[in-house]
Amino acid sequence: MISLYSKKYFWLLIVLCSLQPVVPAWAQDSEQASTAGKPATEEDFYRIVTLPIPEGVALEVGGMAVLPNGSLAASTRRGEVWLIENPYGMNPYYKRFAHGLHEILGLAYKDGALYMSQRGELTKMTDKNKDGIADSYETVYAWPLSGHYHEYSYGPVIHPDGTMTVTANVAFGDVEWWKGESRVPWRGWTMQITPDGKMTPYATGMRSPNGIGLNKEGDLFYAENQGDWMGSGGITHLEKGDFVGHLAGLRWSDRPESPVKLKAEDVLAKVAYPQVKFGVKPEDVESDKIQPLFELEKDIPAIKTPAVWFPHTILGISTSDILLNTTKGAFGPFDDQLFVGDQGHSKINRVFLEKVKGVYQGAVFPFREGFVSGVMRITWGKDGSMFVGQSNRGWGSTGKEDYGLQRLVWTGKMPFEMKTVKAQPDGFEIEFTAPADKKTAQNPAAYAITSFTYKYHPVYGSPVIRDKPHKILGVKVSDDGLKARLVVEGTREGYIHQIQAADVRSQENLPLLHETAYYTLNRIPDGDKLALSETNTKADHSMHGDMSASTAKNGASSAQGTASKGNSKKGTSKAGTQVKRQTNMPASWKAPDQTFTIGTQPGLKFDVEKLTVKPGSKIKLTFNNDDDMTHNLVITTPGDAVEVGNLAIKMGLDGSKMSYIPKTDKILYHTNLLQPGSEETIYFTAPEKPGDYTIVCTYPGHAFVMQATFQVVAN
């Protein structure tokens, strides 16, 4: 065991250095006064508090559970379970409860025992002699393993009747190693297991189901990650017999115990362009020839589409844990909503769900970013704060630490947010957390709505397709200012709708903390439509500068991206500056002075750490994306890679179309965005000024870790 009490003076210093400042309630008024006039930030409303971790403990959190006495149990990817007493105070006490286990990626407590998912089994751990160390390990149920590194297992979620739900990741292929495979039963499946060890296959089509959770009604949801057959991440309502999209698990659907009777060939027979193979660039396939998943649902009733899509790179890249808000106001104004973590972007998003015509759908909103590592697990403390367990080993994250344990605490201040978005027969209704200024909230020009979707195909991920702007025909604001009813032209069933409210202000003239929601409109509700005569139809574009700064920035990015897509055969543009993406050797060159090839390594890494060139030398550089995810290659001015990466994250829906190349002079040269298994060669002249320039991938979230040095050295 490790006691922090025995080293109290040493650890007190560590705690004081590591904790982010927490302002007590009595001091908040003075703090508000000191920050008057400054834009509100997430930190003003939800503070991140870092828990100290003892030296020598690699707390790569894979599971968490709060015990009846308020202590926190945390399992790690290294096969340990730690009990943490006083996790709310300045001096937590760590004791190792169990070790020698196999990559624990889920933990739950029930009736005096801890249950966990290891690689190949659901295990029950009990401390029978009450000494704080597990002395009983029982296999509740074991499932097969092929030995592939990617065969992660998650859970359990424990239902009120004691039944437990676990999910199992697919493996990857040997040649096409991005391709999900179910090599042994029940990989790519959700399983339900009784306390006495009876397993029932429940649903399939999962690729990387890192999160499982229940909503207020007790219905089961799982979180998915982008990959082959998965255009983006999101959360899906699971019912027995569902197929949610990935074909690998259908390998076992002919077994008598399988509730899914669908075959892979049944799906492929309905998929347009099933011959699309690994390495095919999205722009080489006509987008309108590859249908989205919801269109197949009409022909294949077993298909279940996501309740809420999480637009990839905009709201994260690696969807993780699902947590229902049961705090009854202790965590702010979002009771009964879901919080969903993202490992790659080290952040948490917020979800509002509703049921329309018997189908779940709803909106996802940004909530809190800035955690020290990749968000893996979230759970409630006894005080209504949220514990956030983190890890990035092998996966990478925007948070640069290898692991972390933090708490998210509501400060008591009310953020001005879109609390809910609900579908209407003729548009949407937005509910705010505080009364809105009616003049801005009823202005149709204060809003912008764009619908879009993703391809359903075997290529890794998908660009945004079929995007279409929608005119706001009219707006009606409730008398109390808490609701705005938007009449929208031509909303589309099955599509994701980006809803921006950038120019809405509160009665105190504050902007929304987060101005954008993404609503997945699986079903358009029936009911009475709002007469335009009841709404304000006159759009005032002068009120706040004609939409938001983010819209303007996206437009600038679009212009830059379009210009950079052309393949110029010359080395300079009309203005005399070098073309940033040159894919043919300039006619004036006889041959390159230096030729390089760069590939990738697992864990968001290039396979070289440094390229050294001479000033002004002619460079031929080939980027071979042999990874299992999408990347680009960008060379930036010295020290500016992270700033460029942040600009790429802010590009929104335009990002994938523009290869995540923002408009900035800090980018010198770049490739396009490359799918796994593809490559691109660019030609450029090295800078004349010596220095350490940076090679970076600007795919959102990657820039923080995926870097190498482009060193220009004078003779």
Image (cartoon, rainbow, N blue to C red):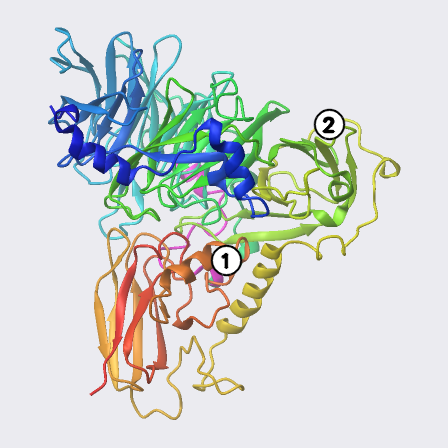
Name the main secondary structure of what is drawn in magenta.
loop
Disc 2 to disc 1, C-alpha distance: 35 Å
Q: Is residue 298 left or right of residue 471?
A: left
**Residue 146, placed above or below residue 648:** above
Q: Regarding mark 1 in the picture, which secondary structure is present there? A: helix
- Can residue 170 be seen here? no
What range is drawn magenta here?
Answer: 262-283
Numbered tag placed on residue 526 in the rendering: 2
Q: Indicate the position of residue 252 as horizontal and vertical percent values.
A: 31, 29
The answer to if 645 sits in the magenta stretch is: no
Residue type indicated by callout 1: Gly
Q: Amino acid at mark 2?
A: Asp
Is the C-beta separation of discs 2 and 1 under 8 Å? no
Image vertical order of residue 68 relative to residue 65, above or below: above
Q: Nearer the viewer, residue 57 or 579?
A: 57
> Nearest the camera: 58 or 86?
86
x 69%, y 47%: residue:
447
Residue at mark 1: 655
Q: Nearer the viewer, mark 2 or mark 1?
A: 1
* Residue for point 45% across, 80% down: 579
Q: Tell me: residue 387, above or below residue 403.
A: above
